[in-house]
């Protein structure tokens, strides 16, 4: 059993409420179960409970066994001094405040409906792709829709702290933060870490000083990425190497190791060398890109702003010194751009709206996702086989959150769909 199941039972009072008594025989009446606490401290804050003739206001702590109180060292934590009720599945031992006063205890073992408990055990032991695979459609469609809306907000909230930390490290410089996050997006999962390192080691401020010279931007990016530390046969990489040598001394730069970058099992069009060349062109072609993104109202405007092609050298190369037989323009494709919008731009807009207390930008983040077609990946295909029909990236992102954060962790008691299944029993 998981404590989250008991949280669910307590929060929604999904247990037998008749003639409730503490394990010492005092009557219990729940006025308010309190507010679920997602931070440190007791599980439910600001509850109001009548025990005997006294109305208590304080906190509620929930455990499977009462002895978990000591196991979790709550007796050493002053945050638990205001616990007015200990709710447990089984009281295997009494628990006391530091003052020596016994904490009132409500035991749920005989108060849970057998059908609810049986369903919970079934879900917890399920080995299906999602625990409720055979019961998923028992939840009303409106419940599923509203839950996906909440999950979408939660997914953006989860990325809030990561991006907020980057913003803080950049002293609230949004353009620099956007540049670093954008570099992350150019990594396309496989090379996200080296792209992040490249952006941190080569600030946008430095690149901006050479914005009018694509050659110098490429020299800085490829040099810092560690790709120019070799002997070359061709003229172009040798010129880049010479230029980088000068700029490296000027700005006191330290290049990365080229071994940080991954090429294996990748399509050549996604090689980091090509992505770096595209990033160089984007920096060369645009100024104040973040401001332009913020002003965009349609996803097509952002797609146009991010549509760039490499310089001419890369039309016949995927890596330095190895020309291809055919020349072709190598642009950042629409699928890659849409992934950047989904994973970088929408979360940044949401963060900006939250930081500035402006709902307009948070709403814009949602609308951008609604304008993008549903993503296609293994998880989404599985959802589609179960009958889910996402209409946009907004819904596919919510479904990814549901699978990764709830279904895989079997957090059925925290899930609105799981709650609906329990509620039907």
Image: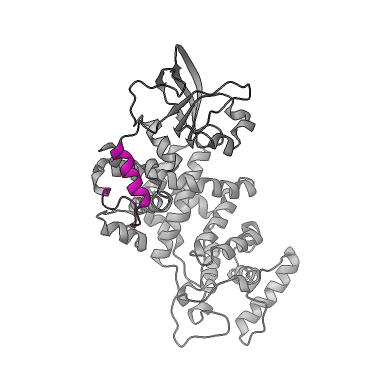
Looking at the image, which is closer to me, 419 or 309? 419
Whether 347 is drawn above or below 285: the answer is: above
Q: Quadrant of residue 18?
A: top left
Residue 415: percent from the left, percent from the top? 37, 43
- Total marks in image: 0
Query: Residues in magenta?
Result: 114-136
- Image quarter of the N terminus: top left
Residue 31: percent from the left, percent from the top? 40, 19
Q: Is residue 304 visible?
A: no
Residue 130 falls within the magenta-colored stretch = yes
Looking at the image, which is closer to me, 310 or 30? 30
Whether 21 is drawn above or below 241: the answer is: above
Whether 201 is drawn above or below 272: the answer is: above
Give me the residue at 26% from left, 59% from top: 385
Whether 249 is drawn above or below 379: the answer is: below
* Left or right side of 258 for 6: left
Looking at the image, which is closer to me, 255 or 37? 37
* Left or right side of 231 for 57: left
Residue 129: percent from the left, percent from the top? 34, 57
* Left or right side of 25 for 237: right
């Amino acid at each position: 059993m998981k404590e989250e199941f008991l949280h669910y039972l307590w929060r929604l009072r999904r247990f037998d409420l008749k003639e409730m008594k503490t394990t010492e025989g005092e009557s219990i009446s729940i006025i308010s179960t309190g507010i679920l606490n997602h931070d440190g401290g007791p599980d439910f804050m600001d509850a109001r409970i009548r025990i005997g003739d006294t109305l208590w206001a304080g906190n509620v702590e929930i455990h499977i066994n009462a002895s978990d109180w000591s196991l979790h060292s709550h007796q050493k934590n002053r945050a638990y001094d205001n616990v007015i009720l200990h709710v447990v599945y089984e009281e295997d031992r009494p628990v006391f405040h530091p003052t020596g006063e016994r904490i009132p205890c409500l035991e749920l073992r005989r108060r849970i409906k057998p059908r609810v408990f049986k369903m919970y055990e079934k879900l917890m032991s399920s080995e299906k792709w999602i625990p409720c695979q055979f019961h998923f459609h028992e939840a009303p469609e409106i419940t599923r829709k509203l839950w996906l809306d909440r999950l979408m907000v939660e997914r953006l909230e989860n990325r809030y702290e990561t991006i907020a930390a980057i913003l803080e490290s950049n002293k609230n410089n949004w353009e620099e933060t956007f540049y670093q996050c954008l570099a992350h997006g150019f990594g396309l999962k496989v090379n996200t870490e080296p792209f992040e390192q490249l952006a941190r080691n080569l600030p946008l401020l430095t690149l901006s000083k050479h914005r009018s010279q694509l050659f110098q931007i490429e020299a800085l990016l490829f040099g810092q990425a560690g790709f120019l530390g070799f002997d070359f046969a061709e003229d172009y990489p040798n010129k880049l190497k010479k230029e980088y040598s000068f700029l490296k001394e000027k700005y006191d730069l330290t290049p990365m190791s080229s071994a940080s970058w991954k090429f294996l099992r990748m399509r050549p069009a996604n090689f980091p060398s090509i992505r770096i060349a595209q990033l160089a062109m984007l920096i060369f072609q645009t100024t104040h890109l973040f401001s332009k993104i913020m002003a965009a109202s349609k996803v097509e405007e952002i797609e146009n702003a991010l549509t760039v092609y490499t310089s001419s050298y890369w039309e016949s190369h995927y890596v330095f010194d190895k020309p291809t037989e055919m020349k072709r323009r190598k642009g950042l494709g629409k699928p890659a751009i849409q992934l950047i919008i989904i994973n970088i731009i929408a979360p940044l807009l949401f963060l900006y709206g939250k930081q500035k207390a402006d709902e307009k930008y948070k709403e814009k983040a949602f609308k951008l996702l609604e304008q993008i077609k549903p993503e296609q990946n293994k998880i989404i295909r599985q959802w589609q086989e179960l009958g889910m029909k996402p209409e946009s990236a907004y819904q596919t992102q919510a479904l990814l959150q549901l699978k990764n954060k709830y279904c895989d962790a079997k957090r059925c008691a925290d899930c609105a769909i799981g709650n609906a299944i329990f509620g039907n029993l």
